[in-house]
C-alpha cells in the first residue's frame, strides 16, 4: 500500500493540469500519445546508473486519482467544472514499458515508455520524474559505495539528514542499490527492509559514567550490543570500558557484538581499537565506523587497511552527495500515431522520436558491450550509430542481444512481478558484475557505447528539419 | 492535518527505539532530560540560515504515536512486549523552545530546546532533525535567490527533480524563504501556497504546428496565457508565433500574459524577445525564464540587464544545490536536572551544557550586531565571549536585546500561533533586512558574531575536564 494514499492526483505540477484541461477542452482527451523517460548526464561523474523506483511508481499510479475535495480545491484555483467532473472519474489506464528494477542503464536511453491517451500520459509526468529520478540517484550512490565496500556490511544512517520525507524513498533505494540495513524504521516497516541501530552519545551521557552506561546496555541487549566509544575519549576511556564490559559479557556466556567509532581519524582509531580488542581476546568484536562517510572515504579507509567491519553511511548516501538530482526528463515521442520530437540547436537536446525499444548487446562472456536504441518495428539491426556523431558506428552482429525494456503495466494494471528491495539489490549486483570495470571506475570512467539504428537516425533528421 | 498521519512513531531511527527501551528497562522513563538542536556550518558558504520547518514539526509531534500494528512490527523485530505496551500509550508531552519560524539564525546557536522525560525527548530526535535540517536548508536557498531577484516574481518549479517526497516540504520551504508561487499542487493544497503553471513542450508538439498550439491555448486560457516559445526555434518561430497570438488576443480584448524561455542563452534571448514584443506593441507581455537557474545565474542575468520578469527555479532550489543537507545535530545538554555535554578533542565539537537562552543584540538602528548564548538563570550579561577563542570578547551593554527562543510547545500542546507560509516569508524578509549586508554577500561573507556568557564558558570548561 503506497504511503501517500490520499490526494495523489495533486502530486503533479500545476501546468500538467492546465494542459490536461486544454487537451480536454480542445477535444483531444482520447488522442493517443507516447512519452519517453530518459536522463542525459551520468551522476557523480560516474559511468552507470542503477534504475530504481519503478515498483513504487507503478503502485502509486493506482492511487493517482482526484476525489471531491481535490476537485473542489482545483475549482477554487480556477479549473473548469466540466473538466473536473472528468477528473473525478479519472483512472490511469495506460501501458508502461521499462527495464527490470535494478537494471544498469545509461544516458539517452528511453528507459521508460508510457503509452496511453494524452491526458493520462501527461498528468503523471511529475510523479514519474520525481520518483525515478530520485530513487535511481540514490541506488546509484549505494551501488558505488557497495563497489568499494565489497563484503563489508553497509548500513544506511541517513534519515536525520535526508531531504524531508525524501528519506522514506532514500532508504528503500539504498537497499535496492546494495546496502544491507537501514536505521529508518518507517521505511523498514513499509518496504520490508531490515532495520538496525546501536546507541547515541545521549545514552552514555544519561548515566553517571561511561562504564555504567555500557554495562546497563550490555545487560539489556546481550545479543546485539554495540557500544559507542567516543563520547569522552575513544582510546583512553571508550575502548577500555568496552573491553571491560566485553569481558564481563564473556563470563556470562554472551558476546559483545561490536564497538562504534563516530569521530576522529577512523583509520588510526580502528587500527588501535582492533589491537586493543585483540589483545584482550575479543577478536570477535566487530568495529563499526560512521561519520561523514562516502564512497571515496570508504575506499581510502580500505586502502589504508583500516580493520572496519561495518560502515554506517548517512548524508552522502541519502542526499546523493555531489549531485542532488538525476536530470531525467519525460518527452513526447508519439502523438496521434505519428512520431514527434522536440528540436534544439544543441543536437544532444533534440529528442528521439517514435516508439523505441532498448537492446543490450553482450559479448561471448556475457559482458555488456553496447546498448542499442531501435524503432519498435525494426526486426533486426546489425549496426548502431553514435547518436550525435553518426560517422561513428559499431557492428553488433557478433553479439548476443537482450531486450531491456519490457511491458510492466497494461492498461493501468501492473504486469511486472513484485520483488522485494533485497531481490532488486541482488539483481542489480548481478547486472553490475557484467559491466566492464572501465565503466565502473571513479576517475574518468570509459563511456559505455549507446547507439541508435539507421532508421531512427534518419527519422530524427527528417523531423528535425521541419520548421513548425 | 499532517500529511503522514499513520505510523508516525516509526519515523525514527532504530537506535532511538533501542535506547528508549533501554531507558525504560533501567527505570529511567521519568528521568528529565533536555536536548538542543543546532547546526555547525553555514550552508552554501553563506552567512545566515533562515530557520524553517517548525510548524510542520510541531504538528507532526501530535501524531507521533504507535498503534497496535506498529507495536506488532516492533515485536517481530525484537523489541520487548512490556516496553511496547508502554509505547502503545506513548504521547509526546514535552516542552519546546524555538525561534519564530523564518527567524535568521547562526551556527552553534541552540535554536531549539526540547525538555521532557528522556524517552520522549530521545524518540523525536530523528523527526526533528529530518524536518528542521531540510526546510531550513531550502528556505535559506530561497532567501538567497530572493536576495538577488528583488521584486521579480519567483516560482518554484522543482517537484520533478526533488528528492522524492522531500518535494512536499521543499515547496513549503521555498515559500517560507521568499518564493511567490509553486508548481507543486500537492503542497499548495496542503500548506495553502499559491500554485501556478504554464505549458510544456509536449503541448506544442501535440498540435500540428506551434501557431495552432499557441492559438488554442490562448483561446482556452485567455486570462493567464503564458506561451513556451522554445519547442522549435525561439527567435525564428516561437516569439513571432507568440506575437501573432498576442495581437489576436489584443483584438479580442484579451492580453497575452507572458512568454517563457526554457533553453539557450537567457540573457540574449530575453533581450531579443523583449525588443520583438515591444516593437509589436506588446510591452505588457512578461518574460518568464527557467532552466538550471540558481542564485548565481539569476544574479548574472540581472547584472547583464536581462529583461526577465519572472524566474522559475527548480533543481537548485528544491535540493539545496551546493549543500544537500544542513548539518544540524541534537545533543543532550541536561540530564536529571544537571548540565551535561559531549566532549571532543576538537573544542568546536564539544557541546554547550545546561539550559540556555538565545539573545540578539541590536544597535541603535535596529541592525543585528551579535547574538549571545547565556544560561537561563543568568539575569543580565554585559560581555559575551567567542565560544572557541575566549580571549576574544564583545561588550554588548550598549545594545538593545531581544530573546530569540520562546516557548512554542507546552506539555505537547502547541502554544505558538499558527502562521501561513506567506506570513513566515514576510517575517523572514523583515528580519533579513536587519542583517548587515556584509553577512549576506555570497563571496566570503563576514562571520556574524555569536558569543557565550562567562558562566557558560566556565561550565563547559569544568564539565569537559571531567573524565567519565
Image (cartoon, coloured by chain):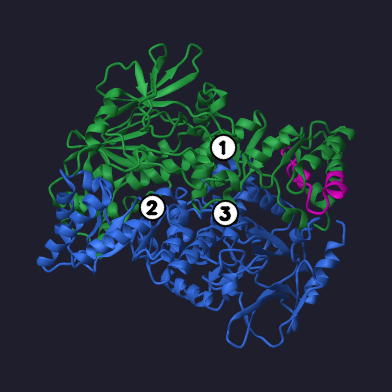
Chain colours: A green, B blue
Q: Judge if badges 2 and 3 mark residues of a common chain.
A: yes
Left or right side of A311 for A192: left
Q: Residue under circle 3?
A: B325
Specify the label residue A142 is tagged with: 1
Left or right side of A237 for B200: left
Specify the label residue B291 is tagged with: 2
Q: Where is residue A6 in the image (x, y as percent from the top left)?
A: 36, 52
Q: Position of residue B437 (x, y in %)?
A: 56, 74
Work out whether residue B100 can be spotted: yes
Q: Please give the range of residues in magenta.
A: A217-240
Estimate the spatial distance between the alpha carbons at disc 2 and disc 3, rounded to whole Å: 23 Å
**Parent chain of label 1:** A
Characterize the local packing of mark 1: few (<14), some (14-19) or many (20 or more) Cα atoms within 10 angstroms: many
Mark 2 or 3, closer to the camera: 2
Residue A36 drawn above or below residue A262: above
**Parent chain of label 3:** B
Q: Which of B423 and B178 is in front in this view?
A: B178
Which corner quadrant holds the C terminus of chain B? Answer: bottom right
Residue A461: quadrant of the picture: top left
First in sequence: mark 2 vs mark 3? 2
Residue A143 drawn above or below residue B340: above
> What residue is drawn where x is 47% and y is 46%?
A325
Q: Where is residue B406 in the image (x, y as percent from the top left)?
A: 60, 76
Give the secondary structure at mark 3: loop
Q: Nearer the viewer, residue A351 or A196?
A: A351
Amino acid at each position: 500500500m503506497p504511503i501517500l494514499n490520499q490526494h495523489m492526483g495533486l502530486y503533479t505540477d500545476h501546468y500538467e493540469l492546465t494542459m490536461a484541461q486544454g487537451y480536454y477542452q480542445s477535444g483531444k482527451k482520447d488522442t493517443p500519445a507516447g512519452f519517453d523517460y530518459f536522463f542525459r548526464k551520468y551522476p557523480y561523474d560516474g559511468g552507470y546508473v542503477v534504475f530504481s523506483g519503478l515498483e513504487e511508481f507503478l503502485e502509486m499510479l493506482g492511487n493517482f486519482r482526484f476525489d471531491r475535495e481535490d476537485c473542489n480545491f482545483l475549482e477554487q484555483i480556477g479549473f473548469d467544472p466540466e473538466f473536473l467532473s472528468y477528473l473525478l472519474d479519472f483512472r490511469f489506464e495506460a501501458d508502461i514499458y521499462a527495464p527490470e528494477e535494478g537494471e544498469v542503464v545509461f544516458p539517452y536511453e528511453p528507459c521508460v515508455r508510457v503509452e496511453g491517451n494524452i491526458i493520462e500520459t501527461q498528468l503523471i509526468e511529475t510523479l514519474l520524474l520525481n520518483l525515478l529520478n530520485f530513487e535511481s540517484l540514490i541506488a546509484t550512490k549505494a551501488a558505488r559505495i557497495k563497489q568499494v565496500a565489497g563484503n563489508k556490511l553497509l548500513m544506511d544512517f541517513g534519515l536525520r539528514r535526508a531531504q524531508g520525507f525524501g528519506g522514506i524513498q532514500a532508504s528503500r533505494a539504498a537497499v535496492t542499490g546494495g546496502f544491507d540495513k537501514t536505521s529508518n524504521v518507517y521505511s523498514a516497516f513499509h518496504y520490508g527492509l531490515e532495520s538496525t541501530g546501536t546507541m547515541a552519545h545521549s545514552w552514555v551521557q544519561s548515566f553517571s559514567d561511561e562504564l555504567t552506561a555500557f554495562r546497563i546496555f550490555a545487560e539489556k541487549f546481550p545479543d546485539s550490543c554495540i557500544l559507542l566509544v567516543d563520547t569522552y575519549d575513544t582510546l583512553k576511556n571508550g575502548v577500555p570500558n568496552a573491553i571491560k564490559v566485553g569481558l564481563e559479557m564473556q563470563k556470562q556466556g554472551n558476546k559483545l557484538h561490536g564497538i562504534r567509532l563516530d569521530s576522529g581519524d577512523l583509520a588510526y582509531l580502528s587500527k588501535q581499537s582492533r589491537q586493543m580488542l585483540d589483545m584482550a581476546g575479543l577478536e570477535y568484536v566487530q568495529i563499526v565506523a560512521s561519520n561523514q562517510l562516502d564512497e571515496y572515504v570508504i575506499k581510502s579507509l580500505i586502502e589504508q587497511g583500516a580493520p572496519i567491519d561495518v560502515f554506517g553511511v548517512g548524508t552522502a548516501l541519502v542526499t546523493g552527495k555531489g549531485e542532488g538530482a538525476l536530470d531525467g526528463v519525460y518527452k513526447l515521442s508519439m502523438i496521434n500515431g505519428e512520431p514527434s520530437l522536440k528540436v534544439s540547436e544543441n543536437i544532444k537536446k533534440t529528442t528521439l522520436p517514435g516508439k523505441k525499444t532498448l537492446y543490450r548487446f553482450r559479448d561471448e562472456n556475457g559482458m555488456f558491450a553496447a546498448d542499442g536504441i531501435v524503432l519498435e518495428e525494426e526486426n533486426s539491426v546489425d549496426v548502431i550509430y553514435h547518436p550525435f556523431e553518426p560517422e561513428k558506428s559499431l557492428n553488433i552482429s557478433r553479439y548476443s542481444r537482450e531486450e531491456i525494456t519490457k511491458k510492466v503495466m497494461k492498461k493501468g494494471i501492473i504486469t511486472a512481478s513484485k520483488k522485494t528491495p533485497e531481490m532488486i539489490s541482488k539483481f542489480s549486483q548481478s547486472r553490475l558484475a557484467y559491466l566492464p570495470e572501465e565503466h565502473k571506475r571513479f576517475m574518468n570512467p570509459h563511456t559505455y557505447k549507446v547507439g541508435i539504428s539507421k532508421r531512427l537516425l534518419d527519422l530524427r533528421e527528417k523531423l528535425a528539419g521541419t520548421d513548425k
